[in-house]
Amino acid sequence: RRRERALRGENAKYKEELENDQRMITELNAAIERQTVTIAGLQTRVDSLSGENLRLGTELASATTALNRAYYVIGTEQE
């Protein structure tokens, strides 16, 4: 009888631990889902910024080429 009571007590303790662990797993899965959505949104922003960076790099190269032209004139000051 005493052994049976001790085992029932242990069983109740383990059931409570199991319920707590299952609750924790559910909460962690929900956190993972939220973070997955956040990561997807951030990846979209990174892709957008990468495209914009490429566009601006091309625009800068064109502007640099246009603005760095040099001209020289051959002749005298009076001409």
Image: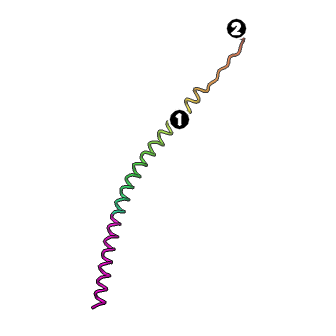
Quadrant housing residue 12 = bottom left
Q: Find numbered disc 2 in the image and state the secondary structure of the residue it sits on.
A: loop
Q: Earlier in the sequence, mark 2 or mark 1?
A: 1
Most distant residue in the top direction: 78
Tell me, yes or no, whether the highlighted magenta stretch contains residue 5: yes
Q: Name the residue under label 2.
A: 78
Q: Which secondary structure dominates the residues rendered in magenta?
A: helix
Figure check: 59 above or below 49: above
Measured as percent of width and height from the top left, residue 40 is found at 40, 51
Which residue is tagged 1? 58
Asked if residue 70 lies left or right of residue 30, the reply is right
Residue at image position (37%, 53%) is 37
* Of the pair 35 and 72, the residue shown nearer to us: 35
Extent of the magenta region: 1-26
Between 29 and 55, the one lying in front of the other is 29
Q: Answer above or below: position of 38 versus 73.
A: below
Residue 41 appears left or right of 12: right
In the foreground, 26 or 63: 26
* Magenta stretch encompasses residue 16: yes
